[in-house]
Amino acid sequence: MYNAIIDSLCKDTLVSQAFHLFSEMLAKGISPDVITYGSLIFGLCLEGQYKEAIDLLSDMVLRNITPDVHTYSILIDGYSIMINGFCKSKMVDEALNLFEEMRRKNLVPNTVTYSTLIDGLSKSKRISCALELLVKMHERGPPANVVTYNSLLDGMFNIKQVDKALMLFKQMKENGIDPDICTYSVLIDGLCKGGRLVVAKEIFQDLSVKGYPPNVRTYTIMINGLCREGLFEEALALLSEMEHNGCLPNAVTFETVIRALFEKDENDMAEKLLREMVARGLLKRH
């Protein structure tokens, strides 16, 4: 009976009430089991109280209750959430420390944990460290997925390691991981910014043939690449083609072309597109 109520309270994030019942159980000499602890650990993780969740796991082990797969899974998810939070706050060293703590506690990181950390390292331009983690994934498991590789590719292109990024893209496919439209968007953007417009155009033109219809982001990236080289006719032709293919340009697409046109003193065309943007309701008036 206690387990059912504690579980329900934890799922409703009424963790303090659940712990009140837990104390009552102990006072009455009723021994908690793996289900009791699992529910409480889940509740603490839901509230972001990860340190308390780890302490409770230690308490569980001291009472000779062996954590089950579900309990470990909850804690791994909790660690993944914390690592993600640190990475988003650009606190990558803290995220790495937490990752190592997981390993010390024999909590095996899953693909989400690894991918989150690789993304944080890649955004912080710590590519060699991110690549080391990828090697560990291949050696120990869990398997890397398309999200893992997309983060690394983006990081490599951002520090202008274009050839290494292309090698990684090749390795990704050799490892049986199919690229998605996000992969191709990262690839095209990196090639455009790395001065490889011709290769970027070839990849873009092959997308639909390969079964990857470009989305608004992919089109915008390709249009931006053309604008950077002053190829406005091609950019405007792609803008028309995009609509013809049923992919509506958004505010970012229009702003990309308009900004480039103004920079090259193509003011008449820029103003025409600006009026069209207003007519479509894409320009917010303050």
Image: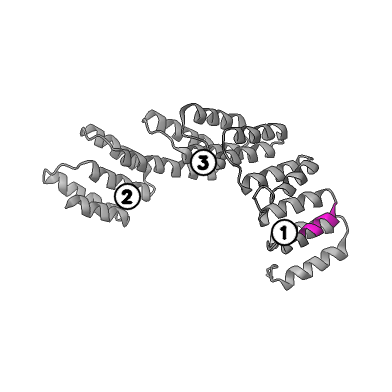
Tell whether 121 sits left or right of 160.
left
For the magenta stretch, what is the residue range?
231-239
Q: Estimate the x, y position of residue 220 in percent, counting from the top left.
A: 72, 55
Q: Estimate the x, y position of residue 171 in percent, counting from the top left.
A: 62, 32
Of marks 2 and 1, the one in the foreground:
1
Determine whether the residue tagged by mark 1 lies in a helix, strand or loop: helix
The residue positioned 20% from the left and 48% from the top of the image is 22
The residue that disc 1 covers is 253
Q: Residue 244 carries which label?
A: none
6 within the magenta span: no
The residue lying furthest to the left in this view is: 28
User: How far, Cα to Cα, is label 2 from label 3?
Assistant: 23 Å
Tell whether 60 sits left or right of 274.
left
User: How far, Cα to Cα, is label 2 from label 1?
Assistant: 44 Å
Where the C terminus falls, by quadrant? bottom right
Q: Residue 116 carries which label?
A: 3
The residue that disc 2 covers is 43
User: Dot 3: few (<14), some (14–19), or many (≥20) neighbours within 10 Å?
Assistant: many
